[in-house]
Image: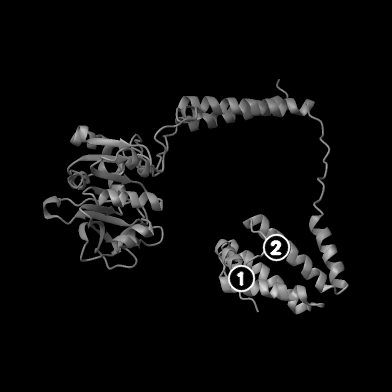
Amino acid sequence: MLKKGSLYLVIGVATLGLLLLLQYNQPKTINWFESYVATHKIPYGTHVFQTLLSQKFSAKVSDVRVPPFEFLNQEQNAKGTYLFVNERIAFEKTELNALLAWTSQGNTLFIASKSFEERLLDTLNLGTGYLYSGFEEVLKQSPFWVNPALKSATPAVYDRGANTPVFDQLDTLNTTVLGSLRTSGALDLAKDSLRHNVVRQPFGTGHIILSTFPEAFTNYFILKEHNRDYASGLFSYLDAPGKLYVDQYYKNGKSFYTSPMYIFLNTKELKWAYYLALIGVLVYIVFEGKRKQRAIPVIAPLKNQTMAFTRTIADMYFEKSDQKNIAEHRINYFLEELRSTYYLGNIDREGDFYKNLAQRSGNKVEWVTSFFQFMEKLRNKEHVSDQELLQLNAYIEKFKAEKNGAKRTTVQ
């Protein structure tokens, strides 16, 4: 007959085995991560779109796996359409300028993203906003192309998410609306209202096309019901002279995984073998540790007494009412901090010194001049009042706040 402890152990192991069996046999969870990677077959990957591109344009398609600035420097003779698709795309200032310069030479820049950087929107005189559905409701939207030749008898449908970005401000003189959408149940619009989500503008001798609907390029959208007609219209705007450069750099997900754990965790059998090994190691540690582990004494770490020491010294000065000495120490420490931070020497020519310090610290020249004159005034006085000491401290704190980019404070 089994002992009570052994019986509990058998029941525990059987229960654990049953749970692992149930977990192993349950359906695989759908990965809804918005990766936009060309090799991903998950709903928000772009494998289908990339395959259709290769079939339709064949040798015309060229994948770009480096930043745009680096690509344009390497391929100075590149001509055609540069396509960016991701949930969020934000270029550096120099990179954006390089892309705009390349576009102005007769090329096309196509960006599909849920948000755009302010510099690009300001350049094109555009503005974006969001449509929202009700609480815990899905915002159903039907995107379509404005061009009558691209309209489909059966409207496309996208039914995921509670909000969608649209263009709510257009430069009507230069902007051409390519695509719009209808929504049902948006909080700030009447039923079945219309908003624009794809626009085009001339830029130099080229064109810029912006879309707030990157989901149109995903596997989920293209393979869903009648949405392929909308995708076909999308290809018509990519069929421009020159090559089609498809960006693979600005993506939420990774195109390949360097960690060997990715193989274990994405193969069902290897993943559970890995989990069982971890459980076995844990069981071994628990049972072996009960016999061999001994108590480890707790040693309290040494306390940092720097603040207490500084406060004690400051209290001694203050109790003696030696504000003059406190002010001298405060000024000397501040000047030494300036020398070590900005590598400034002694004040030989005051005007040049103040101007240089103001530029480096982000303060105004007049304010820096007033600050240093006030410190010189305190140095020349025999006695310093409590109010003057507080004013000195306020000046120094304001200077540091401006240096660190904090909000300005008013010095009385």
Tell me residue 230's x, y (percent): 20, 48
- Relative to 297, say whether 167 is above or below: below
Label 2 amino acid?
Answer: Leu
Of 260 and 386, nearer the camera is 386
**Number of numbered discs present?**
2
| Residue ID at (81%, 31%) | 294
Q: Please give left or right for residue 109 compared with residue 285 in the image.
A: left
Within 10 angstroms of label 1, few (less than 14), some, or many (20 or more) residues? Answer: some
Q: Position of residue 189 (x, y in %)?
A: 30, 67
Camera sees residue 88: no
**What type is the residue that disc 1 sits on?**
Val
In the picture, the quarter occupied by the N terminus is top right
Q: Label 1, secondary structure: give it.
A: helix
Asked whether the beta carbons under mark 1 and mark 2 sit within 8 Å of each other, the answer is no
Q: Quadrant of residue 34?
A: top left
Depth order, front residue of 222/395: 395
Structure colour scheme = one colour
| Residue carrying label 2 | 335
Q: Is residue 30 left or right of residue 204?
A: right
Q: Residue at x 27, y 44 (%)?
A: 82
The answer to whether 288 is drawn above or below residue 101 in the figure is above
Whole-angstrom CA distance, mark 1 to mark 2, is 13 Å
- Where is the C terminus found, in terms of image quarters? bottom right
Report the residue marked by disc 1: 368
Q: Earlier in the sequence, mark 1 or mark 2?
A: 2
Residue name at image x 63 percent, y 64 percent: 400
Q: Residue furthest top?
A: 1
**Is 58 placed above or below 154 here?**
above
Residue 164 location in percent, x, y? 34, 57
